[in-house]
Image (tube, helix red, strand yellow):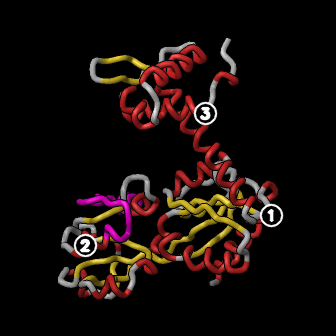
Amino acid sequence: MSSYFHYDLHSLRLFIVVAEFGSLTKAAERMNLTLGAVSKRIADLERSTGCALLLRQPRGVELTGAGKGLLVHARQVVERVNRMANEMSDYAVGVRGHVRMWANTSAIVQFLPRDVRTFLTDNPSVKISLEERLSGDIVAAVKSGDVDIGIFADNVPAPGIEKVVYRRDKLVLLVPNDHPLALLESVAFVDTLDFEYVGLNEGSSLLARLLAAAFSAERTLNVRIQVSSFDGICRMIEQGLGIGVLPEAAVRNEILASGLRQVQLVDDWADRTLFIGTRSLDDLSPEATRLFNFMAGRSDA
């Protein structure tokens, strides 16, 4: 029976490279090894797992089902070891605490840069690893313990998470200056649905909110183009490719100066809440607890 002692990190890293290149020869070149050394390490992995991991083809290799499964685990193992090494290096140079935090686009664009700067000014020995993710992914990572703290939108279910209000924001409509809706100071969302939209990619809480509002009105949201950022939405609207909905604080003066106009939405759902959450406050490190409490106190900022 195989044992975890048979799985060394170098072989797992090599297997990842082989999978990415689809070639033993290219992996050998990338890792500065001989082709024989690469073949031997893959053969050792196959003996350890008791499974064939690669299918040898005339022009390279393909992963078997077992190989695809091992690739997922190998990437997780290597990523966690890299994270461990980075955190230990931080401690060696005087960092006293490392906090992992994921936040959605709205929080990062509007609030987090200033809040993180303020916190780190008073807590210079703390390191924050901040990543931008979709709200649903953030909740899942918090529940699994992969991140310490998450900031996510209020329309994403978060059972089993301790959460408090982080910030509140307001959604507005953004249109070109020559658009028919640009003549209005405010508008109901349902009255915008005759026009094509530029939206965020699937999975974003903002797109889900718009789709739900259109469904409630028994209408269809006509999304012409989907992009991955607020900046992308603005650029597409500038080119006349549709209209869009963004958080008000994300609409900077230079955006309005580029020929776009902001129109207020009168719908109740346009007023949003961003939550900050963690799996368990009792399980947070002192540094993470300090950051959580600081962010939780920003709701009145």
287 sits left or right of 194 in the view? right
Task: Determine the residue positioned at 55% across, 31% down.
Answer: 12
Q: Secondary structure at mark 1?
A: helix
Q: Quarter-wise, where is residue 185 in the image?
A: bottom left
Q: Secondary structure at mark 2?
A: helix
Determine which residue is flagged by label 3: 9
Q: Is residue 219 visible?
A: no
Q: Is mark 2 in CB contact (under 8 Å) with mark 1?
A: no
Please say whether residue 189 is one of the residues in the magenta stretch. no
Q: CA distance from mark 2 to mark 1?
A: 45 Å
Determine which residue is flagged by label 1: 286
Please say whether residue 231 is one of the residues in the magenta stretch. yes
Determine which residue is flagged by label 2: 237
73 sits left or right of 285 in the view? left
Q: Is mark 2 in CB contact (under 8 Å) with mark 3?
A: no
Q: Tell me where the magenta segment starts and ends, as one range.
A: 211-233
Q: Residue 55: where, in percent of width, then height? A: 38, 17
265 sits left or right of 73 in the view? left
Q: Residue 224: where, in percent of width, then height? A: 23, 60
Mark 3 nearby-residue class (10 Å; few <14, some 14–19, many ≥20): few
Task: Determine the residue positioned at 25% across, 60% down.
Answer: 225
Task: Say whether disc 2 or disc 1 marks the residue closer to the N-terminus.
Answer: 2
Q: CA distance from mark 2 to mark 3?
A: 48 Å
Q: Secondary structure at mark 3?
A: helix
Q: Quarter-wise, where is residue 24 in the image?
A: top left
Q: Is residue 125 visible?
A: yes
Judged by depth in the image, the label closer to the viewer, 2 or 3, is: 3
Q: Is residue 202 above or below residue 171?
A: above
Task: Say whether disc 3 or disc 1 marks the residue closer to the N-terminus.
Answer: 3
